[in-house]
Amino acid sequence: MATPASQKVSMREKIGYSLGDGSANLIFQMMMMFQLYFYTDVFGIKATAAGMVLLFARVFDAFVDPVVGIISDRTNTRWGKYRPWILWTAIPFAVFFVLAFVTPDLTERGKILYAGVTYTLLMSVYSFNNTPYSSLGGVMTSDIKERTSISSVRFITATIATFVVQGLTLPLVAKFGQGNASKGWSSTILLFAIIAVVLLVITFLSTKERITPPKGQKTPVKQDLKDIVKSRPWKAMFALTLFLFTTLAMWGSSMSYYFNYVVDKAALFNFLQNFGLVNIDGFEYNAWHKFLDAFGLIAFSDLSNVFAVGFSLFNMFGQVITLLGVILLSSFLSNIFGKRNVFIICLTLTAVW
């Protein structure tokens, strides 16, 4: 039996573990924010068909998740129960991520079929990767304070990954594509996929499972399912997760359309010009502008990339506010009102807003 002192987790290991969530969010945020937009505006699938593809994949994945949990709980290797899945799924995760964002020359029916198969496989591999990953955090230590610290570091890394996806995807697509949207998307996704694999490998190598079940302990699958059905906290979290992720999906998928088709591009260009984020005659670049331009975050006077720059800056500003709110306010408010109450109040305010 490991002692509490032996279950202290170093900051190096916490950061290593958090990189797994950074990897997952490079892919998850792409699916939430840009998958529907990619299908309709780049791949050329009708909106109704694209919506059905996303719906089918996510309903199918709802049945995959418990299966993954059952399998990973019963996995026994020299690396532990959950760590191996992070390594085993790294390459398939990246491969299906890339395949979900390429544009093969197919008929309309062929495109729908291709999108349905690749997106469903991507969602399934995501479950096989992220479910064991989430469980890993619970067996790294039994120290509650250490677990809270692990979760905090993980959240920061996930927010950084979200910042990168929401803030840099469209500018990189425009920069890599040079007018060819398909090329731009495939190049950007390939870059993110390579980074995702590297981060997952680091997570596998840098973490350790310290908590193991007693030898000989076996729980029937039927009993596991009964325990889930009878668990009130599980039911509450299921309902919360359902509505929360529905909201995130609707908001994320719709905002790109709003910026592209509703926001006046000339007005957006003028707004960006107030901050010196445009490329016009006579404008003198400094080192900061050159840095932004390297990531495609300078708008051109022909308005060809103003949607990408404006939408990306909007997203990045939101993520900075989120990160500052967590760092500056979450612990302070939780210590006064309790985590549960703060979570309920903030979630209610989010719903009302």
Image (cartoon, rainbow, N blue to C red):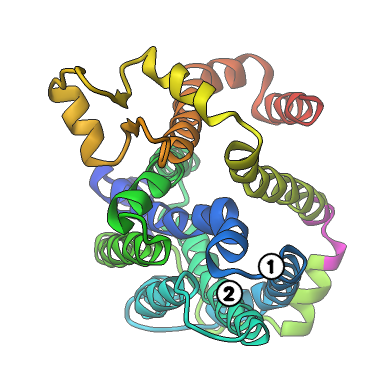
Contact flag, marks 1 and 2 (Cβ < 8 Å): yes
Residue 190 position (above or below residue 309):
below
Residue at image location 47% in from the left, 51% down from the top: 142
Q: Is residue 98 above or below residue 185?
A: below
Decide: is 205 above or below 64: above
Image coords of residue 296 (percent x, y): 30, 40
307 sits left or right of 349 in the view: left
Q: Quadrant of residue 102?
A: bottom left
Between 73 and 98, the residue placed more toward the observer is 98
In three-dimensional space, the C-alpha distance between marks 1 and 2, rounded to whole angstroms, equals: 8 Å
- Find residue 82 and report its image quarter: bottom left
> Main structural element of the magenta stretch: helix, strand or loop?
helix
* Residue closest to the eye, 290 or 1: 290
Give the mark count. 2
Residue 86, visible in the rendered structure: yes
Image coordinates for residue 317, horizontal then vertical, percent:
46, 26
Label 2 neighbour load within 10 Å: few <14, some 14-19, many 20+: many
State the residue position of label 1: 54
The residue drawn where x is 33% and y is 76% is 79
Q: Dot 2: what SS?
A: helix
